Image: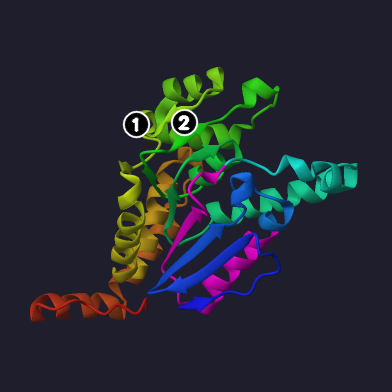
Amino acid sequence: MRQLQLQTDKMLAHVEDGVGWITFNQPNKRNAVSLAMWQAVPEIIDDFISTGDVRVVVLKGAGDKAFVSGADISEFEEVRNTPEQVVAYEAATGGSHEVLKSLEIPLIAMIRGFCIGGGMAIALSCDIRISADDGQFGVPAAKLGLGYGYGGIKELVNLVGPSFAKEIFFTGGRFSAANAEVMGLVNRVVPVSDLEVTVTTLAKTIADNAPLTVKAAKAAINEGTKDPDQRELDRIAEMVEVCFNSEDYKEGRRAFMEKRKPDFQGR
């Protein structure tokens, strides 16, 4: 296992068996995200990508109360008070979300407890969401008078459709894990006791598969959620061609014929 050394102890990160684990580590505040935590996200992802030892990333929250309950509002007086601070803060949050959304390898959210507001936005940036049966979801913008931009709402609509998206935003209420599963907001709901092993098994399964194929599939699916005139289909075709020309494609065929598990190298 490789542990990352970060500038804040409110984020934890380590790599094990091809899986990069990122933990929002502020359980006393239900893992509300502080400025230092937002700033750490790109640092962690940059390490995962640059070292080349990570094939899938899992996001989780510390403790048993929350995945992420939103932004750490308690520090706003200190870090989001002046116009200059607001610009810097928005740059940090926007940068973190962009890094997560643009990640080319699979991203899994492992959700316990509260997944509210900013926590929902983080979960929506993931490719797969697995929730424990104690999960609670919601976007309370309507209860706070906040405006919510098109990009974030479109991500939700892509997942749950217009009708459920309207219910989530119009009510500003909380929804159980069971409700979230019906909406399509999460891939599946499992008992709390099964959450970690379920996510670990899923992540390891993905990590063991051909990285170039998984990367191409993620890219193609993401293109499909864009407006037709914005889709980069030539790039997808190139990624597919790379798969067919790869050593991993040869290894996959050999392993199939030899009735053994393939050893993919991502090249």
Pick the quarter of the image with the C terminus: bottom left
In the displayed structure image, the side of residue 120 where residue 176 appears, left or right: left
Label 1: state its secondary structure. helix
Residue type for callout 1:
Ala
Residue beneath the point at 49% across and 43% down: 124
Q: Position of residue 166 (x, y in %)?
A: 50, 20
Q: Nearer the viewer, mark 1 or mark 2?
A: 1
Q: Nearer the viewer, residue 3 or 156?
A: 3
Q: Is residue 246 above or below residue 28?
A: below
Taking the magenta stretch, the answer to whether it contains residue 59 is yes
**Residue 181, how many percent across, how many down?**
34, 34
The residue at the point 15 percent across, 81 percent down is 254
**Position in image of residue 15 (x %, y %):** 47, 73
Q: Residue at x 55, y 32 (%)?
A: 153
Residue 189 lies in what quarter of the image? Answer: top left
Image quadrant occupied by the N terminus? bottom left
- Whole-percent x and y of residue 98? 61, 52
Label drawn at residue 157: 2
How crowded is the residue under tag 2: few (<14 C-alpha within 10 Å), some, or many (20+)? some
Q: Residue at x 55, y 23 (%)?
A: 169
Disc 1: which residue: 178
Amino acid type of disc 2?
Val
Number of numbered markers? 2
What secondary structure is marked by label 2? helix
**Magenta part of the chain:** 39-68
Q: 266 left or right of 140?
A: left
Where 125 sits versus 216, above or below?
above
